[in-house]
Amino acid sequence: TLVYGASSPSPVGEISRGRLTPPQTETGERQRVVGSEGGETLVEFPLFLQSELVLTGDGSPFKSFVADFMKKDLLTLGLADSSASVEARTVVGPLVLEGMEVNNQFSMNGTGQGFSDVKVTGFDLSHSDEEAVRLTA
């Protein structure tokens, strides 16, 4: 469940069919994590989540999130009462992790007061630029 809010999070919707993928290099190759003898991570990179979000109820918690995104500097989102399974290919063979509990909050930058007078008529996250959120106003 995707939730919004720091003190008493409200359910925004249910995430399904999620898939995490690493970013690609300019040549189209996937970036890889390289380890050392001490087990320390030498390279870190983001994983992109592609999924479906079915909004809760009439979508009003999501509408509140979008309105706050336009006005606040920082927002708190999270995953609550969720689970995930992972299937990964590694150099030593497949890694399968099933039924991992996922309960985590994270922060997201908003636009601050920059768009407080703008009316949002569309919201799109289905594009390839990981640094941007596409808004239609």
Image (spheres, rainbow, N blue to C red):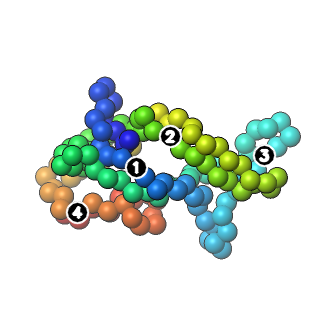
Binning the other alpha carbons within 10 Å of mark 4 as few (below 14), some (14 to 19) or many (20 upward) gives few
Residue pictured at 42% horizontal, 39% vertical: 79
Amino acid type at image mark 2 = Ser
Mark 2 to mark 4: distance in Å? 30 Å
Q: CA distance from mark 4 to mark 1?
A: 20 Å
Distance from label 2 to label 3 (Cα)?
27 Å
The residue that mark 1 highlights is 15
The residues bearing labels 1 and 3 have C-alpha atoms spaced at a distance of: 31 Å
Above or below — where is 128 with respect to 52?
below
Instruction: Name the image quarter holding residue 21.
Output: bottom right
Label 3, on which residue?
A: 35
Query: The residue under label 3 is which amino acid type?
Result: Gly
Q: Amino acid at mark 4?
A: Gly
State left or right for residue 43 relative to residue 99: right
Considering depth in this image, is 29 or 51 the residue closer to the camera? 51
Q: Mark 3 or mark 4, which has the lower sequence index?
A: 3
Secondary structure under the numbered disc 3 in the rendered image? loop
Give whichever of discs 2 and 1 has the lower sequence position: 1
* 39 relative to 48 in the view: left or right: right
